[in-house]
Amino acid sequence: MTNPDDSVSPAPESPIDDAPEGVDAFEPDVDDASRERALRAGLEEYELAEEDLALLDSDGEDFDDAPEQGALPVLAIVGRPNVGKSTLVNRILGRREAVTEDKPGVTRDRVSYPGEWAGRNFTLVDTGGWEVDVAGIDARVAEQAEVAISLSDAVVFVVDATVGITDTDERVMRLLRRAGKPVVLCANKVDGASGEADALVLWNLGLGEPYPVSSLHGRGVGDLLDAAMKVLPEVSEHGALRPDGPRRVALVGRPNVGKSSLLNKLAGSERVVVDEMAGTTRDPVDELIVLGDQPWWFVDTAGIRRRVHQTRGADFYASLRTRAAIEKAEVAVVLLDAGEQLTEQDTRVISQVVDAGRALVIAYNKWDLMDEDRRKFLEREFERDLVQVQWAPRINVSALTGWHTSRLVPALERALNSWDQRIPTGRLNAFLGELVAAHPHPLRGGKQSRILFATQASTRPPRFVLFATGFIEAGYRRFVERRLREEFGFEGSPIEISVRVREKRRR
């Protein structure tokens, strides 16, 4: 980037020459409020659009705060592997949200989505297939399904009507009876009237009427949901899975960098499936964790693959949902493998967070496994390859041992405080007035663009609007951003700067 300090020649005119006579914006005895009034008065000589006036009248206030929601009832979808649970979830949601593929074991964690039916809002939980007498990763998937049942208010038990009742189905049925939750029995894969006879056999489970459904084609799903709404309470007995209060943190990074391990270490339990095989997590998973005496919502996301169009099947949709998880979060913790060189995937993940306008914390994981030679090159590598995010807090952790994970909360708080930070308009213009007087915009074509006035349009992330007499080059905008950070901090938050070019009114 061209440094304006070196390349820009001072110009004799001040960027606020249009202020009313008798008011010197750079006099030290003039307070910020007077300076702001003087600059705004000068703007009256310029052609301003209605949106400009609305922005100025708002005084930089944000008006997009969403109202808080209450605790929604939880409806869990359970069943043995490959009976069509995720397909049913997609049918209920009306969009392809849950990962589906024509083989068992694609859904490995319990995943929640907001659902709606007949005017009722609820939380829909998709689970991994429940198997008995299994070991390894399949055993942990089964544990997640049991947790989903315990945290639900009602359960839809999905059985493959074309196969009939299996030993696993009977074991799940006994599990549901012990849990004491209301159960709606779904006889899935009934694609026509001829298959309804197969559904009748499921009466033998003793869970009441089986509802014949084709989740693939949508047949009978409405009747199933009507039955579920009858047993689902208005308010969850377990509280909201995603309340608005706690700050939302997305754990992101390339596959097998330790995101799930870090989440489990922070939670103090085996919350998500962890395995040495890369790509174990394919769906974002939410977990409410208390750290530093305050609750945080953590989202463990699927590892982002090389490029979306180069992924196939389940990984393709998981990559899209990881992007959605970043959008729904307030701050993202990007995990990097301290023992390996920075890759193109790592920089792409960081760029994705910055482009989404989310606060950012960079965590170097597996620090305990790094040798001394690697440490010597790490700082140089960061300055070379991540120069665009030098403002992000960095912490070194070990998800395996928990080493330095206590440093995560202070880093998150610094990033979020910057993300929420607002600079008073008077103070902002005092700073910019001094800045552009010392380092004006370079001359281009015999003309020099001047910044007339600035305001902070919004927070989350901080967005500044500069009113100018001409185009402000990208290099100069980066210079202004760098000086804003030096003056006001903004550690851990991206900054957006937009320019509105306005001409003088014709007399």
Image (cartoon, helix red, strand yellow):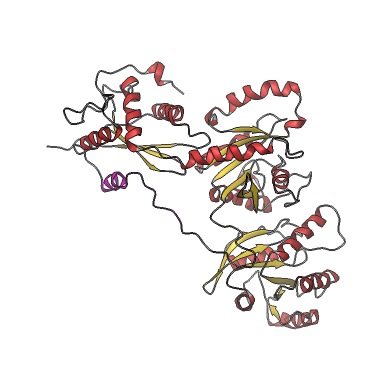
Residue 140 is situated, as x and y percent measured from the top left of the image, at: 79, 55
Compared across the picture, whether 41 is left or right of 233 comes to left
Q: Please state the extent of the stretch shown in magenta in the rendering.
A: 49-66
Q: As rendered, which of 215 and 496 lies closer to the eye? A: 496
- The number of numbered discs placed on residues in the rendered structure image is 0
- Please tell me whether residue 477 is drawn above or below residue 211 in the rendered image: above
**For residue 435, above or below residue 207:** above
Is residue 63 in the magenta section? yes
Q: Is residue 356 left or right of residue 304?
A: left
Residue at far right of view: 133
- Which residue shows up at 72% across the image and 65% down it? 150
**Residue 91 pos. (x, y %):** 61, 67
Magenta span contains residue 133: no
Residue 362 falls in which quadrant of the image?
top right
Query: Can residue 426 be seen by looking at this rendering?
Result: yes
Q: Residue at x 54, y 64 (%)?
A: 70
Please state which of residues 176 and 45 is positioned toward the viewer in this rendering: 176
Q: State which quadrant residue 331 falls in.
A: top right
On the question of residue 467 being in view, the answer is: no
Judge by depth and name the residue closer to the eye, 104 or 360: 360
Residue 161, horizontal then vertical, whole percent: 76, 75
Horizontal side of residue 326 vs 16, given as left or right: right
Q: Quadrant of the C terminus?
A: top left
Q: Position of residue 400 (x, y in %)?
A: 76, 39
Residue extending farthest to the left is 507
Q: Nearer the viewer, residue 316 or 150?
A: 150
Specify whether 325 is left or right of 4: right
Placement of 153 over or under 104, stated as above or below: below
